[in-house]
Image (cartoon, rainbow, N blue to C red):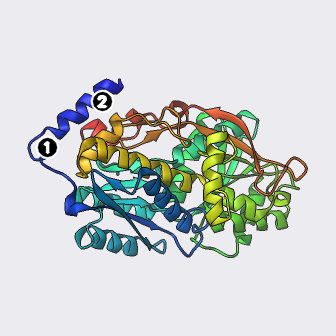
Amino acid sequence: MIARAVLCAVALLCAPGLARAQISDDVVKLGVLTDMSSLYSDATGKGSLLAAQMAVADFGGTVLGKPIEVISADHQNKPDIGAAIARQWYDQDKVDAIVDVPTSSVALAVQQISKDKDRVFLISGAGTSDLTGPACSPVGVHWTYDTYALAHVAGKAMVERGEDTWFFITADYAFGHALERDAAEVVTASGGRVLGSARVPLNTADFSSFLLQAQASGAKVVALANAGGDTQTAIKQAAEFGLQKGGQKLLALLIEITDTHSLGLATAQGMILTDGFYWDRDAATRAFATRFYETMHVMPSMIQAGVYSEVAHYLKAVKAAGTDEGKAVVAMMRALPINDFFAHNGTLRPDGRMVHDMYLMQVKTPAESKGAWDLYQVLATVPGDQAYRPMAQGRCPLVTGN
């Protein structure tokens, strides 16, 4: 299979015009576009920038004899700002690939611009599964997680345990909508029912009215379809309202290790979650996390670990392809094996989805934890082909031909 993929990549490189392409502007330039100042900054932000810089340093700082440069910017979680930065980077600053981009509404805008400019888009922070569905791109690579995987790993497990009535508290933008949609689908497909939902503006400080709706619904599961600071706020206020003491289960469909650490085990203990990376999984993850911690003084989130992995693989593909031309590099990224501390035997599909194992985890109790970052126990390893949406179901035009 790999040999066939390599042959396909080589054939693409031999197409007219591509064989002559080398390194544009004599530098490979990466732009880390992320949240440096708001609710997603702990799990992305400066840590994502560091992860990209670590990958470049470990690669040797050059590729095909040309320097590798990393720049960064804060998109402020606003699609218009993110789009403006992407256009400037591509048109004026000659950026070859944009990296990370938490906030799905921003990522969807950058995906289209990257497609128009034939520049590689390495997505780690954004979650909507539409990025490899209707909005897929021949130069878009969705590496770390998506809403389908988050919903199906934890959602299916909860319903199978008898937690079969749900109420959603949902961030009112593309990511939250996709996460609620994907989770609702797996709940109903597994025999459960959705009793209601509440849409919440981004960066909300007061969740009281939404939590009261969830309590009144009588749902067994109150599912948080949000992330970052919004998730932390909702969990803290849910504890104040006594949701869990009243018998309801609180499920954070996306919670990063930085969120859990900030909340503390006394508040977060017992919660079920889905993650694509855990720093204490094995020797390789611990080695990366130790290096990361030396600079950031926190353990890496799955998004930050994913940034390192996707940048490292991108650089390998540039070297193997002999060019930084967008479609040629992504073709080589599909052809090359993906094996590192983040993903074992990962595969990059034609729709842009990188398929790798995901993990069903539970937050430890204070008594079970042996240290400040000893937060999770792995309940199950879910193979990538079970965690991620089948490509035929995604409605990606690159796959369907429509």
Circle 1 residues within 10 Å: few <14, some 14–19, many ≥20 = some
Is residue 188 left or right of 379 when viewed as pictured? left
**Looking at the rendering, which quadrant does residue 40 occupy?**
bottom right
Residue 11 position in % (x across, y down): 18, 33
| Pick the front one: 396 or 304 | 304
Residue picked out by circle 2: 5
Secondary structure under badge 1?
A: loop
**Looking at the rendering, which quadrant does residue 276 occupy?**
top right
- Residue 150, compared with residue 380, is above or below; it is below
**Looking at the rendering, which quadrant does residue 92 occupy?**
bottom left
Q: Residue furthest left?
A: 16
Q: Amino acid at mark 1?
A: Ala
Circle 2 residues within 10 Å: few <14, some 14–19, many ≥20 = some
Spatial separation of the CA atoms under disc 2 and disc 1: 18 Å
Q: Residue furthest right?
A: 367
At 70% from the left edge and 70% from the top edge, which residue is drawn?
A: 207
- Residue 111, compared with residue 334, is above or below; it is below
Q: Earlier in the sequence, mark 2 or mark 1?
A: 2
Is residue 389 left or right of 265 when viewed as pictured? left
Residue 88 position in % (x across, y down): 28, 73
Quarter of the rendering occupied by the N terminus: top left
Q: Give the label on residue 391, or none.
A: none
Residue 259 position in % (x across, y down): 69, 61
Can residue 311 be seen here?
yes
| Pick the front one: 269 or 296 | 296
Secondary structure under badge 2?
A: helix
| Pick the front one: 339 or 135 | 339
Residue picked out by circle 1: 19
Is residue 255 left or right of 25 when viewed as pictured? right
